[in-house]
Amino acid sequence: MTKQQTTVLGAQPFLRGMPPGQLAALAELCEHVTIPSGRRLFDEGSRADRFWIIDAGQVRLDATVPGHGRVIIENLGRGDVIGLSWMTPPHEWRFGAVATQPTQAFEFDAAAVRAACDADPVLGYELSRRFSAVVVRRLQATRARLIEACARPSSPEPVHDLR
């Protein structure tokens, strides 16, 4: 990755303020990719071997609910991180994701990032801290959507959009 691309990567909200050495190490482990609208990035149960930071576009997280098909969990856009399951065994996606418009993102090789974190525990701690904040925000947003869904009057139609 070029110096300019490293600067763009470092401007992403998720990585903003990361020490230059750690940012340079991460920049070596990713590539800037284009994802066409409609392409699935991953499905539940498949191997979680990467993660992304959205640079432009939108990606929808979904979950399969028996009898209801795919249910929208959240829509993610510029600056958001896609993919948390790569961090912990068994490294399998717990949700699915699809690009809902043409998307550009930084795509990281999960195994390479885990190896870099093992080699540099300070980097590992920094990424763990940042990913933990993402998990907390997603749990809070999910809780709010569940409260909202439960507060609605009962209807014979199932709720498919938890946003």
Image: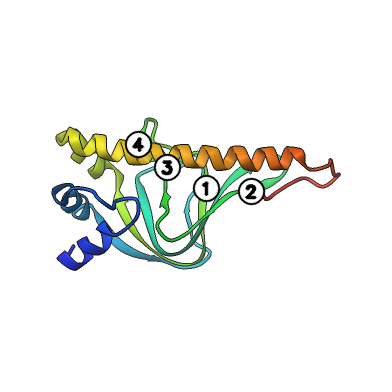
Q: Which sits earlier in the primary sequence, circle 1 or circle 3? A: 1
- Say whether marks 1 and 3 touch (CB < 8 Å): no
Q: Which sits earlier in the primary sequence, circle 3 or circle 2? A: 2
The structure residue drawn at horizontal position 58% and vertical position 40%, both measured from the top left corner, is 142
The structure residue drawn at horizontal position 52% and vertical position 37%, both measured from the top left corner, is 139
Q: Which sits earlier in the primary sequence, circle 3 or circle 4? A: 4
147 on left or right of 28 = right
Tell me: residue 122, above or below residue 15: above
The structure residue drawn at horizontal position 26% and vertical position 64%, both measured from the top left corner, is 8
Answer whether residue 47 is visible to the viewer in this image: no
| Secondary element at tag 2 | strand
For the residue marked with disc 2, what is the amino acid? Arg
**How much space separates mark 2 and mark 4, taking CA atoms?**
24 Å
Dot 1 alpha-carbon crowd within 10 angstroms: few under 14, some 14 to 19, many 20 or more: many
Residue of label 1: 96
| Secondary element at tag 1 | strand
Along the viewing direction, whichever of 38 and 141 lies nearer the viewer: 141
Tell me: residue 145, above or below residue 100: above
**Coordinates of residue 108 in the picture (x, y in percent):** 30, 51
44 on left or right of 157 = left
For the residue marked with disc 4, what is the amino acid? Met
**Coordinates of residue 146 in the picture (x, y in percent):** 66, 39
Residue of label 2: 70
- Say whether marks 2 and 1 touch (CB < 8 Å): yes
Residue of label 3: 134
| Secondary element at tag 4 | helix
Residue 87's mark? 4
**How much space separates mark 4 and mark 1, taking CA atoms?**
16 Å
